[in-house]
Image (cartoon, grey):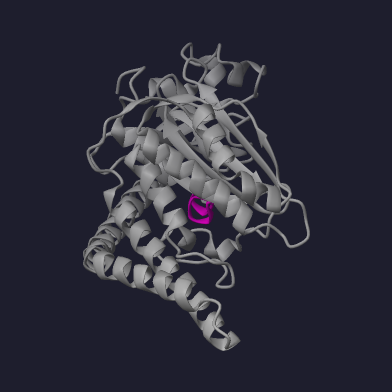
Amino acid sequence: MGNDAVSSSVVQALHVLGATGDSDLQEIVDLAAEICNAEWSAIAVLTGQDYHLLVTHGIEPMVCPQSDSLCQHMMAIHRTVAVEDATADERYAHSPYVTGKLLNLRFYASAPIYAPDGEMVGRLVVCDPGTYRMTSLQQRALARLAESVTAVIELRLRREQDGRRDEEEMSRIAAEIGHDMQVPLASIVGNVELLHEELGHHEDPAVSLMLARTERAAHRLLRMVEGILHFNEIGREKPTETVDLHAVTDQVLASLGPQLEEARAEVTLGPLPTITGSVDELYSLMQNLLSNAVKFARPHVPLEVHVRAEEIPEGWRVVVADNGVGVPEPMRQRVFSMFSRVNSRVEGHGIGLATVRRIVRSHGGRVGIDESPDGGARVWFEIPAG
């Protein structure tokens, strides 16, 4: 792996191992520390000039410059390596993790972690402030645990690919039905509107109410069909350009003005990046996220929305956080699926967040939901800079 280029294998590994607090991986890392009698352990993935310590034991997750890391000498070694005393090895003696500037480690051992294509993407690391000689049994155990991390990467990528295939099939079927429904449904909407004009002020209030409800239902169904057809078009060949995400979000806020005013919303917009992509799809992305925040505002509580971005090694992470009702933890993955809805009492079709995920994926990124510091939802997406 080149020092500067970030391969697709590394991007995939970061994608499926990127969440701190991952219980499966945390058990592996904790077990590695226990078996090897080590104070610290971590999964370290190399991206460009940095190691990302994603899941850790004894230390906080961090980004470690490759030039400081002990792992930098191990990426061509396809076996478990143990260093009894790093202070006595000229390769490691000047590292700030050995000298005491950052840590005081002396014992270091690691085993390789691979992507499904066989490329080494990182190491499972254990280290300790004391000198230590590993037994052959401990070395084999560390190797097996590293193989378990490799297996987790492969399993999660396969599961995600299967999920995408299922979603593609659902999208294809829904789009076919939507195309078939579009013309007759438009005719129904037109006829209902004509009836409403003619009979909307009927002397029988029940007739007026029935017509109004029928017109609303017809328009809602038409919007759902249009949403399905739009969803099916995402990711197809479209012209890409340099997109100022800040300007796009300003346009979205202007279009949502009446809804924001009704929700007594205060939107804080931080600096947002300029990226490469489809301006129409990125507009749709931000529109869905911000309109969702309005939909799920707390009753009788002024809405607060904070939009910001931070640079990450692979590009940018954009966060939209609100003080609304939030998304229960068990539903935070399901809400990105087609026709999934958090609250059936809130009007919607369950397409918005599925559209968000599809747009983000079509731009090579990933998306997720956490709890906002204000108690609502914190939706984030990561997207490459170019």
Q: Nearer the viewer, residue 80 or 9?
A: 9
Which image quadrant: the C terminus? top left
The answer to if 27 sits in the magenta stretch is yes
The residues colored magenta run 21-28
Is the magenta region chiefly helix, strand or loop?
Answer: helix
Task: Tell me which residue sits at (52%, 54%) in the image.
Answer: 27
Q: Is 14 drawn above or below residue 1 in the view shown?
A: below
Q: Is 264 drawn above or below residue 101 in the view shown?
A: below
Q: Is 204 drawn above or below residue 286 in the view shown?
A: below
The answer to if 296 sits in the magenta stretch is no
Is 253 on the left or on the right of 235, as rendered? right
Task: Tell me which residue sits at (63%, 29%) in the image.
Answer: 270
Exactly how many numbered labels are in the figure? 0
Which image quadrant: the N terminus? top left
Q: Nearer the viewer, residue 13 or 25?
A: 13
Q: Nearer the viewer, residue 367 or 351?
A: 351
Give the quadrant of residue 219: bottom left
Is 257 on the left or on the right of 120, as rendered? right
Q: Position of residue 320 (x, y in %)?
A: 59, 42
Q: Position of residue 105 (x, y in %)?
A: 60, 26
Q: Nearer the viewer, residue 383 or 238?
A: 238
Q: Is 356 drawn above or below residue 176 in the view shown?
A: above
